[in-house]
Image (cartoon, rainbow, N blue to C red):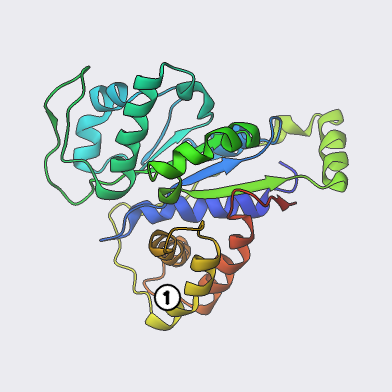
Amino acid sequence: MVGTEQLEKLIAITLFTGHIVHENPVSLILIATPESGKTELMKKFAGNKGVEYLNDVTAYGIMRRYKEDIEMGRVRHFMFPDLCTPLARDPHTVATLIAFLNGLVEEGITAIETYAQPNIRLKLGQHQAVGIITGITAREMKERKRVFGKVGFLSRMLPVSYTYANSTRLKILESIAARQYQQDGTVKLELPRNPWKVHLPIDYARRITSIAVAKTDDGLFGFRKQKQLQTLMMGSALSEEREEVQQKDFDLVVELSDFIGVEKEMVI
């Protein structure tokens, strides 16, 4: 893919955050116009260990199919390429899904009761929380931002907004004309077999605070963004099989933070 190297790096270190002891996996929502390659980006990473790629999703479907995998920590991230698909269902089903995902990505689920599947219980274990990587059009996000914000869904995700510069668009069109898309391969990550402990020096955590606050919507405090950015630094370290965050991890997350936000798109 043309011009998406930074986005691919962001997705990669996000997947590594699912393998850090005592930290919840980071979740992403890619926001861009149609034809921006959101689905193609996710497909490149779909074959990695602990990643489940689903074209459609309901709370009932996840619990029925992946209950044991969530319990045992075999699933660390779900990928839903187009969040618009499950959002097209009736309002009650959509509300149930969003409430379910809220619990899945942050608190972890110990029990869920719905009209469709009562008394589904998960065993208390180390890997309760599961990250999400999904995509939505900029227009759909604009229409749903208020609702997402009201129920806390958006603050649990890192919104990643981007668009293409005219020069990049021309390069993409040229690559399509040359059928270079046929050469787009998958990204195979060396994800650890078992979760790692990664040390985050307090200095880097304190230094990322200004970005966490700046990237937080009005009315919120930035507590979740702080955790998310800290965990991304740890994911960066783990991607290089290091047990401690270094300056290079801080610098990378600062660079990638340009993508974070709903209103302002990063031009690539």
Q: Say what amino acid the circle numbered 1 marks.
A: Ala
Quadrant for the N terminus, please: top right
Location of mark 1 (residue):
205
Neighbour tally class for label 1: few under 14, some 14-19, many 20 plus, Cα within 10 Å: some
Determine the residue positioned at 58% across, 49% down.
160
Residue in the picture at 83% in, 40% down: 169
Spot occupied by residue 60 in the image (x, y as percentages of width and height): 28, 22
For residue 50, say whether it is visible: yes
> In the displayed structure, does residue 119 sit left or right of residue 74?
left
Foreground: 192 or 213? 213
| In this picture, residue 66 sits left or right of residue 240 | left
Tell me what residue is drawn at x 54 percent, y 61 percent. 215
| Secondary structure at numbered mark 1 | helix
Q: Residue at x 50, y 22 (%)?
A: 85
Left or right of 33 in this view: 227 = left
The answer to which image quadrant residue 149 occupies is top left
